[in-house]
Amino acid sequence: MDPLDDLAGRLPRGTVTTDAEILRDRAIDSWALALLRRVRGDDLPVPAAVVFPARTEEVAAVLAWACEARVAVIPRGGGSGVCGGATADVGSIVLDLSRMNHVVSVDPVSRVVQAEAGVRGDQLEDALATHGLTVGHYPQSIVSSTVGGWIAASSAGQASTGFGAIEDVLLGCTAVLPPGAILRCRPVPRSAAGPDLRRLLVGSEGTLAVVTEATLACRARPPGWDWLVFGFPSFAALAGGLRDAVRAETGAAVIRGYDEADAQLNFAALGHAGGCVGMLGFPAGPGEPAVGNALAARQEQARDVLRRAGSSGPLDASYGEHWWQHRHDAVDTYARIMGPDRAFGPGVIVDTFEVAGLWSDVPGLHAGIRDALAAHAQAVLCHLSHLYSSGSSLYFTFLISGMDDQDAAARYLAAWDDAVRSCAAAGGTLTHHHGVGRLKAAYLTGELGEAGVDVLKKIKMALDPQQIMNPGVLLP
Amino acid sequence: MDPLDDLAGRLPRGTVTTDAEILRDRAIDSWALALLRRVRGDDLPVPAAVVFPARTEEVAAVLAWACEARVAVIPRGGGSGVCGGATADVGSIVLDLSRMNHVVSVDPVSRVVQAEAGVRGDQLEDALATHGLTVGHYPQSIVSSTVGGWIAASSAGQASTGFGAIEDVLLGCTAVLPPGAILRCRPVPRSAAGPDLRRLLVGSEGTLAVVTEATLACRARPPGWDWLVFGFPSFAALAGGLRDAVRAETGAAVIRGYDEADAQLNFAALGHAGGCVGMLGFPAGPGEPAVGNALAARQEQARDVLRRAGSSGPLDASYGEHWWQHRHDAVDTYARIMGPDRAFGPGVIVDTFEVAGLWSDVPGLHAGIRDALAAHAQAVLCHLSHLYSSGSSLYFTFLISGMDDQDAAARYLAAWDDAVRSCAAAGGTLTHHHGVGRLKAAYLTGELGEAGVDVLKKIKMALDPQQIMNPGVLLP
């Protein structure tokens, strides 16, 4: 029997499709290089089929079949990944979880939500809004990324400084491992019962298992946000000021710091007069516990910290409101630049590199990666967006033009090569929350060392001996 | 050649000892059953040797030898574990890390400390005090437990509600895997580069690798603590009040809630008049950022939350100060009861069971486990000590007398059996921060399911194919 007929026979009608348009659409994610290749008309591989399971047990049936048939399985959430983590090869099947998009239950006493892996961020938040709750996980991609994708790609939202990253809200989950075993991690706030299996899935990028359901911690939904914005004369002063601010634990859930170039681009509409910009967003409003006197006192404390840290003075709160209102625009902008429209012309590529390091290393990471990218790119912007007591993420946006010749891919990869090397030289990690995918797999040994990659490869071989799970991704 | 002579020849002089007293001392940890057996004069197994490495490379040499000689290796920190995680079998060697007790470096800009695995908690804190810093990881066992033990056993300190558990401060580490590979995870605040290898070590209880060094996040050292204490008429009211308090994010780093029996025992010296007790400890004092108006406003907010949650009213702050001053007494009390002195007589055993669950499950866990233990024990106390927005730990202390006959071990294990089953029935995890060890290994399938245990066993076989690493612990 044809293996695909065999697969289709094991699943409800309509679960497996070989529709050419669907195959083409699910062949790539939002990796800039793939989008560039597609718009250039390159002959990109497409999968043999796209499978749309509706239940965990159907995912198990798919993996059982794939192990027997030795077919590669590419799990897919919203396709918003930017490192090629969901890229189909010829002969593979894409496991599209978009039909598993139900919010299963909300426990208002424990403030937890159980959701299927294919639930999109905006769907999740809409369901929670009726309970006055939020997960507080707000990636820029929230309208196109999914619960399962957040776990697989080790996501962090824009309020992660206060509300935590995905591992901080992940309490329980269900996942399917080859050849179809169903792993159920019961939702608990913490457990010391062995290495945390939930955390083994975070960042595994579909190479070990398919997450089908998760229970996430929620919090009171902030009715609004209140912004403190300060200017800084230099990146060093900005970093130092925000470092002190995060350590003051004033309750600011969003902390962002823009270098001069990034501030100029983002706040030109507000007539920004130059310099770096730091902003603190406080959950605020009548339903929020941390309000009233405590909010006022916390904000005064934050002002005091920023003043003493060498700020050039307060800026208008509209900077924060402007960012909040436009925080998802970059997704559309990216689609317009990189998609079929090619708003900036066919030869322009825009990409992002989000690293992280200790505060001691942050100045070196900023200068080193900026300079490395500037040797290839026409524009390089950077902001700090996920801050910790010990360090910060640095989010670089870069634009390279003239990418309309046959050497474009090589030149794109050369820019990445220099950027990743300068990151490692400055002591940073090559990804804070976008993951590794195909883009950075070759650099994983530099990141984790031979011993670290060896551990991951041994785990991969132990759990997926037929190597059906998302081959080519993550591991070098 | 005798394998031990071979081992000794690979290491500096004095690294390997077969001194009978040292072998006997390092044969067990602080597991109540082992202490009972020792004091009864039972013939306990002792290891073939105790090895005291001074460097990571010496640990690697030991694991290389152990893989060749097929000798079991029992990594040992401070021996403070209470589940038998560091128990020697005949023929095994104990890898005692107490010579690796150096604080390697402190980075005051990033606020991180790099310490060898054998550094005890009090040593670590003493070294940080000169920098005005603290890790904020304060397990009750702080004067006898070590950095490496905290990671291996998935430790959580008494201020974990505000300062996080060990995984929240673990930024980087060095570990040795069989047969001697050295894994170095660079310290970064967060990384999305694959499944987090640092987290694979947390809770691994020496079954996968030996942690030899770690970089931990620090914070400003609180000059003191300021306490809010409230009485509650019932356990349900207590749990509800503290649940609301933790969600208010008022900056209380320590939150504790005592049921009636536990409050009576702990606060008898203060003339406690009955009822449950909830306390919130705020880092306070001139060097602490969260002070002044913000502290006063936060405390007022906390008072308001507790009043509205059904508290029977404020109690004196001396409850908090009393707890803080006596917070390590239980370690001494335990030693006096369970050690050679047998302060309560030879037939008394005291043990603790620390579970965790969602808030919805907390009342059922409290009643279920209390009743299960009460069928075996003369006293059962419970407090909440690690609180989350989604749930809480429940820490049961129980005392069984009449354990001086030959059936004592069986009766002890029968009490555990009932307690663990009632925990599972009520939806909890069987350990919040003590780990699994030998005591709970048989219950791991109930905890993680067949699929979960299968994943851990496959990882174990992949990383430790000769099964030299702490056999008999964690895995059923």
Image (cartoon, coloured by chain):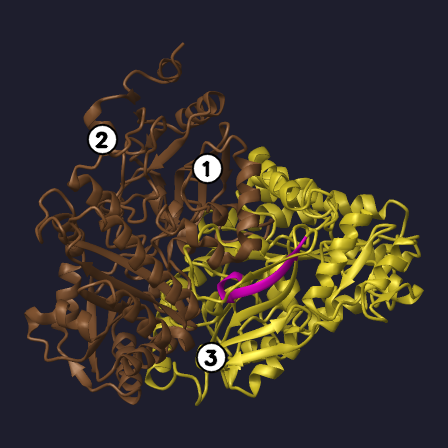
Chain colours: A yellow, B brown
Stretch in magenta: A167-177
Residue A382 appearing in the image: no
State which chain disc 3 sits on. A
Residue A283: numbered disc: 3
- Residue B363 lies left or right of residue A27; in this view the side is left
> For the point 22% across and 61% down, which residue is it?
B398
Indicate the quadrant where residue B317 lies. bottom left
> Label 2 vs label 1: CA separation?
24 Å
Please determine whether, in this image, residue B281 is positioned above or below residue A43: below
Q: Secondary structure at mark 1?
A: loop
Indicate the quadrant where residue B376 lies. bottom left
> For the point 27% across and 18% down, which residue is it?
B14
| Residue position for label 2 | B24
Nearer to us of marks 2 and 1 is 2
User: In this rendering, do the residues under marks 2 and 3 share a single chain?
Assistant: no
> For the point 50% across and 41% down, which residue is it?
B185
Nearer to us in this view, A112 or A305 = A112
